[in-house]
């Protein structure tokens, strides 16, 4: 009776004492002589503006109407995609992604401005209203976030 109980206890102790530690695959943990880089997050006011303007842009993306012109609809889809990339890059503090998404957005915006002449006047007004609101919110979003808060600052 004592022998099986002793075996169970010994097996349990052996299993618990031989647990492997997690491997740390972080590149920062292995670099002993490189300086640590600390990313400053947005402050409260910046975060509030980021949420406000990005939510307005995503609401505009969600309610964007369909037009009778297929070329306009295709370019609107591209514009929506680039706006989502822009907002995602803004939220993840990705400066390179932010620049690329902004250039792609501006390219789609210019194409839509050229395609507006093929729309009916009513559709042209609706498209213009959406584009103006998106551009205004993009400008407010870009101006309300301090660019230094997106860049890495060395830890002293």
Image (cartoon, grey):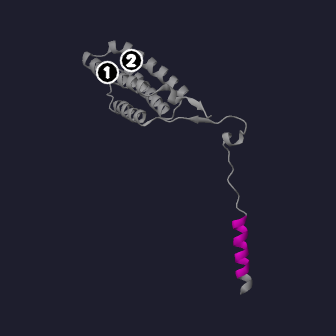
- Number of numbered markers: 2
Q: How far, Cα to Cα, is label 1 from label 2?
A: 9 Å
Tell me what residue is drawn at x 66 percent, y 40 percent. 28
- List x then y, in percent, for residue 92: 51, 35
Magenta part of the protein: which range?
5-17
Residue found at the far bottom of this picture: 1
Quarter occupied by the N terminus: bottom right
Asked if residue 65 is among those painted magenta in the image, a careful observer would answer no
Q: Secondary structure at mark 1?
A: helix
Near-viewer residue (18 or 43): 43
Residue at which label 1 appears? 127
Q: Quadrant of the C terminus?
A: top right
- What residue is disc 2 on? 112
Q: Nearer the viewer, residue 41 or 20?
A: 41
What residue is at 33 percent from the left and 27 percent from the top? 66
Of helix, strand and loop, which one carries label 2?
helix
């Amino acid at each position: 009776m004592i022998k099986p109980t002793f075996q169970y206890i010994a097996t349990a102790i052996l299993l618990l004492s031989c647990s492997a530690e997690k491997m740390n695959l972080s590149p920062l943990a292995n670099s002993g002589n490189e300086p640590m880089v600390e990313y400053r997050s947005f402050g409260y006011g910046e975060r509030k503006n980021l949420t406000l303007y990005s939510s307005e842009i995503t609401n505009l993306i969600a309610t964007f109407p369909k037009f009778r012109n297929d070329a306009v609809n295709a370019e609107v889809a591209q514009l929506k995609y680039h706006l989502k990339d822009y907002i995602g890059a803004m939220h993840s503090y990705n400066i390179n992604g932010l620049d690329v998404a902004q250039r792609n957005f501006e390219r789609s915006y210019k194409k839509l401005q050229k395609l507006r002449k093929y729309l009916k006047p009513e559709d042209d007004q609706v498209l213009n209203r959406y584009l103006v609101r998106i551009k205004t919110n993009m400008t407010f979003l870009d101006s309300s976030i301090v660019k230094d808060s997106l860049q890495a600052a060395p830890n002293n």
